[in-house]
Amino acid sequence: MSKVIEIKSGEIRQNSVVVLKDVNIDIASDEFVYLIGKTGSGKSSLLKTLYGELKLSAGTGNVAEFDLNTLRRKDIPNLRRNIGIVFQDFQLLTDRSVLKNLLFVMGASGWKDKKLMEQRAKEVLQLVGIEQKINAMPFALSGGEQQRVSIARALLNRPKLILADEPTGNLDPETSEEIMRLLVAIAREEKAAILMATHDMSMVEKYPGRILKVENGSVRELNTMNQFDPFTPFSAE
């Protein structure tokens, strides 16, 4: 399996303050991986580094075949075409329909053929089960439907990697479960790796995957769900 994320001895700074150090992560193209940790522990900083918002200040990093060490500002749109990003607060454009939200993103990422764009938009809406809402405005959709649109948007360019930042954070438990089932199914169907930051440990238990925990400025892999309380500090092993 090819690796979609590989970071060795990575360091991440925000406003010159070290947020994470000695980060070593590798994620293969077919894996579902959770990123857990308390608020403010550095989960979002790690995700931002992976999609080019923050620089990797030390170590080496590769994401979707892009070298984070040599990544220039003008390369960032290309990197983001190869990854899909799902945010907690959906980040849909509220002044246009679902279809026009998708077409806008496709136009911004280099699509030209209007017919192919509409066809792909319909395909991804079908994948997430809301093709009937194609002409709806975001405010007319429930939270779960808006998150489905944002997952559809993340799939437009057939990414190798989907980064999901607390995708169920604004949803009720039942809707959260629907979104989780959808993400797991999409990872299999589209052969995309998913790295999902979450606080929702019930989902981690129901849908097992690898678990990375961010704590005390470092990232560490946890072995198994059943043998730990996710929010107790690491023991000195």
Image: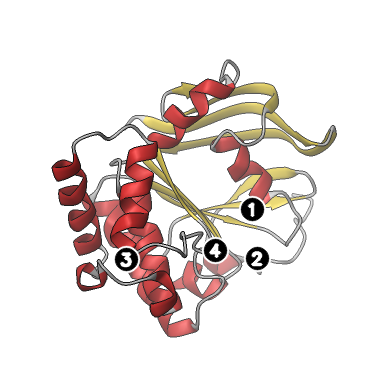
Q: Name the residue that disc number 2 marks.
A: 230
Which of the two marks, 3 or 2, is nearer to us in this view?
A: 3
The Cα atoms of the two marked residues, 4 and 3, are separated by 15 Å
Q: Position of residue 145 (x, y in %)?
A: 37, 73
Q: Amino acid at mark 4?
A: Gln
The Cα atoms of the two marked residues, 3 and 2, are separated by 24 Å
Q: Earlier in the sequence, mark 4 or mark 1?
A: 4
Vertical arrangement, residue 113 with respect to residue 31, above or below: above
Q: Amino acid at mark 1?
A: Lys
Q: Secondary structure at mark 2?
A: loop
Residue at the location (28% across, 59% down)? Answer: 99
Q: Position of residue 181 (x, y in %)?
A: 33, 69
**Which dot marks residue 88?**
4
The Cα atoms of the two marked residues, 4 and 2, are separated by 21 Å
Front residue (pair 135, 181): 135
Front residue (pair 221, 137): 137
Residue at the location (64% across, 42% down)? Answer: 46
Which of the two marks, 3 or 1, is nearer to us in this view?
A: 3
Q: Earlier in the sequence, mark 4 or mark 3?
A: 4
Q: Secondary structure at mark 1?
A: strand
